[in-house]
Image (cartoon, helix red, strand yellow):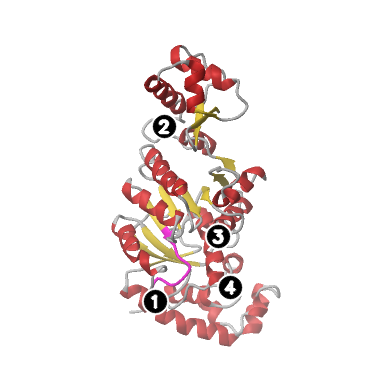
Amino acid sequence: MMDSENVYKIALSMTPGISAEVVRCLAEKGISYSDFFSLNMPDLSALLGPSHGSRFENAHREEALFRARSEVEFVRRHSIRTLFLLDEDYPFLLREIPDAPVVLYVIGKADLNGTPALNLVGTRRCTAYGTSFCASFVRDFAPYYPDAMIVSGLAYGIDASAHCAALENGLSTVAVMAHGLDTVYPAAHRDLARRIISAGGAIVSEYPSGTRPFQRNFLQRNRIVAGLCELTFVVESEIKGGAMSTANQAFSYGREVMALPGRHSDKTSSGCNLLIARNKAHIFTSVPDLMNLMGWRIPALDILPPQKVLFPELEGDQGKVYQFLAKKASPVFIDEIHAATGISMPALMSALTELEFEGIISKLPGARYECC
């Protein structure tokens, strides 16, 4: 027997002019979903007010109901969850954004309220710098938060790297699509999508079956990627691109944004550097710094990660390295540190690793170091 309540909810999402604002208005005014579809337009306009009710023509609502009945049968056959904006199981972070999708279609068992929740986004034309960072970042982050949720868009490049890194480190990962769940785009990532689902993650979309991956859908999709997460992390991006759209959406929602800096000559880092320069994104320095910024406590210990020591009192090789770097206004190559301190290379590598772990210095591309 068809679930009439679910038909009404899906039909609402398919009705032209419907938005999260209108759905909330229906609830505030006590208008049931069945009333929305059964009332004639003048009566509905009188209840909703002229700013909302006059846009919902009878023919549009009837067509939405017809399409919704077919969609309910489709989601039942394919074990797809439908999450409605006002239901308890709808992701609470996503519900907070003003333009939240009215319905989410979900394949997979992932808890979309997993915490902490962050996305890793970036260009499809990523470099080894970006892909290796995704792998190392998730590997370093996962031990602290085994229940974390990594969100991205299943695209080539940084998106795929983020999903793969999450899978390799046992974290739940969620792919947000820009089309219906009757297909996977790009087709080359069908196997990755299956791996995500089988590992306890999820594939998510606001679009019903039959919706093709039109370009405008990807921009709409980006607000869901941002809305599901406490933190948007741009790994590599040019000044124009989907990742910049996601970052700007997150910023407009009052969510935290972080970016991985890169060389000024690298086009794939130009967007990240711009976000940092315009104070729209925090610069990434280390996993502990990120955790402190977000106020994420370590579950096993219920404490925040160690804060950086402002004026560390260091001895031996670590003291020599710190004193040398503290006087430098720009990053220094390891060979220069070796020559200036006279520390043997094996001992120097050990000292640098310890200082980096303590959050006292940062390692930059090209084996360069600087004080934090």
> In terms of sequence position, does the residue under pointer 1 or pointer 4 come before the other?
4
367 or 174: nearer the viewer: 367
Look at the picture and state if 33 lies above or below 265.
below
* Left or right: residue 347 compared with residue 308: left
Neighbor class of circle 4 (other Cα within 10 Å; few <14, some 14-19, many 20+) is some
Q: Residue at x 55, y 60 (%)?
A: 242
Residue 67, given in percent of the width and then of the height, sits at 46, 82
**Residue type, mark 2 in image:** Asp
Tell me if residue 255 is in the magenta stretch: no
From the image, tell me which residue sits under label 3: 242
Instruction: Place residue 209 in its image quadrant.
Output: bottom left
Q: Mark 3 against mark 2, which lies toward the viewer?
A: 3
> In terms of sequence position, does the residue under pointer 4 or pointer 2 come before the other?
4
From the image, tell me which residue sits under label 2: 302
Q: Which residues are magenta?
A: 175-182
In this view of the protein, can residue 248 be seen by the observer? yes
Examine the residues drawn in magenta and state their main secondary structure. loop
Residue 44, given in percent of the width and then of the height, sits at 62, 79
> In terms of sequence position, does the residue under pointer 1 or pointer 3 come before the other?
1
What's the CA distance linking mark 1 and mark 2?
43 Å
From the image, tell me which residue sits under label 4: 18
> In terms of sequence position, does the residue under pointer 3 or pointer 2 come before the other?
3
**Residue type, mark 3 in image:** Gly
From the image, tell me which residue sits under label 1: 72
